[in-house]
Image (cartoon, grey):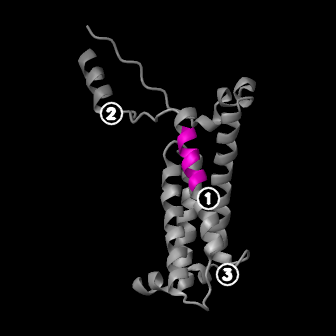
Amino acid sequence: MTTLETPTRHRVPQLLHREAYSSERLRDPSYQAYLILRLAFVVAPILFGLDKYFNWMTFWPKYLWTGFSDFLSVTPQQFMWGVGGVEILAGLLVLAVPRYAPYVVTAWLGGIVTNLIVVGATAGAHGQVFWDIGLRDFGLMLAALALARLASTYTSRPKLTLPGTLRHTRHHRQSM
């Protein structure tokens, strides 16, 4: 006779665990850096993403190489609306999946830096260039990579076992 396997408990995101904020852990400078970077890479992409729809902080299409929007047959503003959606999603992913999402943000920032380099290279001697913003975004890219590395220390690997999987069902059938 086989016994029923104990069902896997649903995992609560680590952000909500009390142990994640123990006083001992909060005194650890590395953990503090992880929390600061995680907060920054949740809030900033969401705010910048939302602003792509309203252009309150700046007129975002001016930073876009027009070849990208021309290739997709959309206006630069429409392209930026898509960029805004991706950025909002990236911030939410860092909140939900901090172990893996910072790598997505790192790649996204690499794309932004590449775009700014292309804009600068095609602008000519008298066009708008954004080397300063490209350098800043390169620094943000490195910070996102640092967050990913810290997250590998402070977050656990998610288990992919789902309720009702074949393994659970098979054990249940054997006991009947």
Residue type, numbered disc 1: Gly
User: In the rendered structure, which disc, 3 or 1, sits on the residue that comes first in sequence?
Assistant: 3
In the rendered image, the vertical position of residue 131 relative to residue 72, given as above or below: above
| Residue labelled with disc 3 | 59
| Residue labelled with disc 1 | 139
- Estimate how packed mark 1 is, as few (under 14), some (14 to 19) or many (20 or more) residues with alpha carbons within 10 Å: some
- What is the C-alpha distance between the residues marked 2 and 3? 49 Å
Residue type, numbered disc 2: Thr
Q: Who's the residue at 56% across and 39% down the image?
A: 151
Q: Who's the residue at 65% across and 66% down the image?
A: 48
Which of these two is toward me, 90 or 5?
A: 90
Residue 163 is tagged as none
Which of these two is toward me, 48 or 16?
A: 48
Looking at the image, residue 163 sits to the left or right of residue 81; the answer is left
| Residue labelled with disc 2 | 165
In the rendered image, the vertical position of residue 153 relative to residue 69, given as above or below: above
Q: Who's the residue at 57% across and 63% down the image?
A: 87
User: In the rendered structure, which disc, 2 or 3, sits on the residue that comes first in sequence?
Assistant: 3
Give the secondary structure at mark 1: helix
- Estimate how packed mark 2 is, as few (under 14), some (14 to 19) or many (20 or more) residues with alpha carbons within 10 Å: few
- What is the C-alpha distance between the residues marked 3 and 1? 22 Å
Q: Nearer the viewer, mark 3 or mark 1?
A: 1
Looking at the image, the residue that sits furthest to the front is 125
Q: Are marks 2 and 1 in contact (CB under 8 Å)?
A: no
Q: Position of residue 50 (x, y in %)?
A: 65, 68
Give the secondary structure at mark 3: loop
Residue range in magenta is 142-151
Q: Position of residue 31 (x, y in %)?
A: 66, 34
Looking at the image, residue 169 sits to the left or right of residue 159; the answer is left
